Image: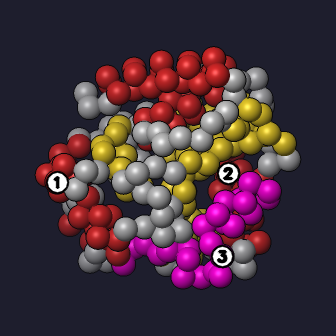
Amino acid sequence: MRYILLPEEKERRLSFYLAMEEYVARHVDEPECFFMWQVAPSVIFGRNQVVENEVNVPYCQQHGIQMYRRKSGGGCVYADKGNVMLSYVCDGDNVGFTFNKFINMLLLVLRRMGVEAISTSHNDVMIGDRKVCGTAFYHLPGRNIVHSTFLYDTEMEHMLNAITPSREKLQRKGVESVRQRITLLKDYIDMELEDVKTLIRTTLCDGERMLTPSEVAGIEQLEEKYLSEMME
């Protein structure tokens, strides 16, 4: 599997990486590829979610937390520099097979860190009874995109206040707070985040593909469409 690289490192919005996933799926001729990214404090919600029901919009505005809609389904997540986002793009039309393959990749990475984890029927990765990684998926003709939030660390106050799941949703899961449902990888391993990223990449990828400046320009053009549609 090829690791997708950008020709320059710079601060980018979450919308850029959503556009990058789609651009890679549509235009990069690799049967299977992967990349990681990190962003300033942001909330990302699923394609079918009503933002006001899932996001504490006044809190996000007050604290400079950006809000974005993605094309995949699933729930609302918070991301910042303390965690890492994973993007997997591959050929195929079998959604279940692709999901299972990606989840097994994550379980392999965690085992190599010495962490025993399991997956759930909801495509979450759990350490014990707490989630360390959630995933979402969408399909293009002949191509699959799976993205995931890998919780190494995070600004817990923002995570707890920026996202507002319903009390009914929490009760269905048998807990009383978001904090009781998640865990942080840093509490289980003696590795810095950069070391974790290196291990993920070397475990999953055996080569790399550098995007060209014209391809980056294509992603930036697609990003504008994402931004225009994101809050609709």
Which comes sooner in the sequence, label 2 or label 1? 1
The residue at the point 25 percent across, 58 percent down is 162
Q: Amino acid at mark 2?
A: Phe
Element class at badge 1: helix
Element class at badge 3: loop
Where residue 106 sits: x, y (%)?
A: 67, 60
Q: Which residue is mark 2?
A: 102
Which comes sooner in the sequence, label 2 or label 3? 2
Give the colouring mode of the picture. Answer: secondary structure
Q: Is residue 190 left or right of residue 53?
A: right
Decide: is 173 above or below 18. Answer: below
Q: Which residue is mark 1?
A: 62
The residue lying toward the viewer, choosing from 134 and 9, is 9
Report which quarter residue 7 is drawn in: top right
Q: Is residue 27 left or right of residue 79?
A: right
**Quadrant containing the C terminus in the rendered view:** top left
The residue at the point 27 percent across, 58 percent down is 163
Q: Amino acid at mark 1?
A: Gln
**Could you tell me how far apart the alpha carbons at marks 2 and 3 are, in whole angstroms?**
23 Å
Question: Alpha-carbon neighbours of circle 1 within 10 Å: few (<14), some, or many (≥20)?
Answer: few
**Quadrant containing the N terminus in the rendered view:** top right
Where residue 231 sits: x, y (%)?
A: 26, 32
The residue lying toward the viewer, choosing from 19 and 182, is 19
Q: Which residue is mark 3?
A: 191
The residue at the point 30 percent across, 45 percent down is 66
The residue stretch that appears in magenta:
180-203
Decide: is 64 above or below 31. Answer: below
